[in-house]
Image (cartoon, rainbow, N blue to C red):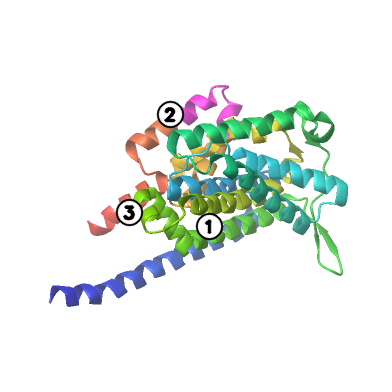
Amino acid sequence: MTSVVTHTLEPQARAARHNRQRLALAGVGFAAAALAFLANDYQLRFIAEILIVGSAVLSLDLLVGFGALVSLGHAMFFGGAAYAAALAAQAFGADIVVVLAVGTLTGAGLALVMGVVVIRTIALFFLILSLIVGQIFWEIVFHWRDITGGADGLRGLPPLTLHLGVATVELTTGRSLYIAAALLALAAWFVASSFVNAPIGRALIGTRERALRMSALGYSIPRIRLMALVSSGAIAGAAGALYPFVNQYIGPNAVHWTMSAMMIIMLVIGGVGSLYGAFIGAAVYLSIQTYVSSYTDRWQLVVGLVFVLTVMVMPNGIVAGVKKLLEGRAKA
């Protein structure tokens, strides 16, 4: 009798969960559309930066949250794609389709290069090797002044454009950049979610939970992790492609290991393994960096306090913590 009731309730629970998800997505979509008309140009540019960086953090979550592969070289994909997109824009024009294609391919290509070096390692060794490869790339970017601008970076980029066949639209306003970043974030979430729910994503989770058993079953763990790394790099590269056009600048800090560390902090604050928690973490970190830093030079101390409090009070991140709180109130 108990099993019959359980089987009857499971479809209802799933339907209720899907309805809540649809309502949440509808609410987010409505809020996103309202922001495009209610926020000013500066605020829209700032939100666009959050969405772009959040997409890069989301790509890191594929590795950390589902493969237990903590990387300190992720900025190599993000910043490397940003440089490639900026250089392509200077040489061929800043068509958004071309820019995104260059960024995505660059991110995936750099991830493949890193994968050759690090993919057979795990845990601390993966962390250290990814850091070393990322810093080698930073050295190249920093010292190749004729191409990358060195410490000065690249400035004066052409305006981002969208060709519609009969007309060309310049994406230079805060609203247009915000819409482009929002569509990118939606696409990044969809691709990452599809990857996680696909057999390759289930296999990646299997390598995290039971690596020896997966190997005994005939799965190639290095191959699974390499596919995850390249997919993650492609998403980070697409995000990096739009990054230079928000502030019309890209510098070597975008490929430094500190950028990777910043992404990890954002991910932990938002929630490892939640995907959309990446955007929450990016919003919290960048808001502190932007607004608190206008009052004190010790804004990083505030980030540290938020990070410690999150780990202590909500060890699974803000998203999981808020969800648990709401579920507790619903049961009460």
- Circle 1: is it few (<14), some (14-19), or many (20+) Cα within 10 Å? many
Q: Is residue 57 visible?
A: yes
Q: Secondary structure at mark 1?
A: helix
Q: Nearer the viewer, residue 226 or 33?
A: 226
- Circle 2: is it few (<14), some (14-19), or many (20+) Cα within 10 Å? few
Tag 1: amino acid: Ala
Q: Nearer the viewer, residue 62 or 220?
A: 220
Q: Secondary structure at mark 2?
A: helix
Determine which quarter of the picture holds residue 219. Answer: bottom left
Q: Which residue is mark 3?
A: 326
Q: Position of residue 86 (x, y in %)?
A: 78, 44
Q: Is residue 40 visible?
A: no
**169 over 90 or under it: above or below:** below
Tags 2 and 1 touching, CB below 8 Å? no
Q: Which residue is mark 2?
A: 305
Magenta segment: does it hold 206? no
Q: Position of residue 29 (x, y in %)?
A: 55, 62
Tag 2: amino acid: Leu
* Quarter of the N terminus within the rendering: bottom left
Query: Quick one: label 2 or label 3, which is nearer the N terminus?
Result: 2
Q: CA distance from mark 2 to mark 1?
A: 30 Å
Between marks 2 and 3 in the image, the one whose residue lies nearer the viewer: 2
Q: CA distance from mark 2 to mark 3?
A: 24 Å
Tags 2 and 3 touching, CB below 8 Å? no
Q: Nearer the viewer, residue 310 or 209?
A: 209
Q: CA distance from mark 1 to mark 3?
A: 26 Å
- Magenta span: predominant SS is helix
Q: Position of residue 153 (x, y in %)?
A: 77, 32
Q: Which residue is mark 1?
A: 192
Is 288 on the left or on the right of 45, as rendered? left
Q: Give the residues in magenta.
A: 289-306
* Residue in view at x 52 percent, y 53 percent: 223
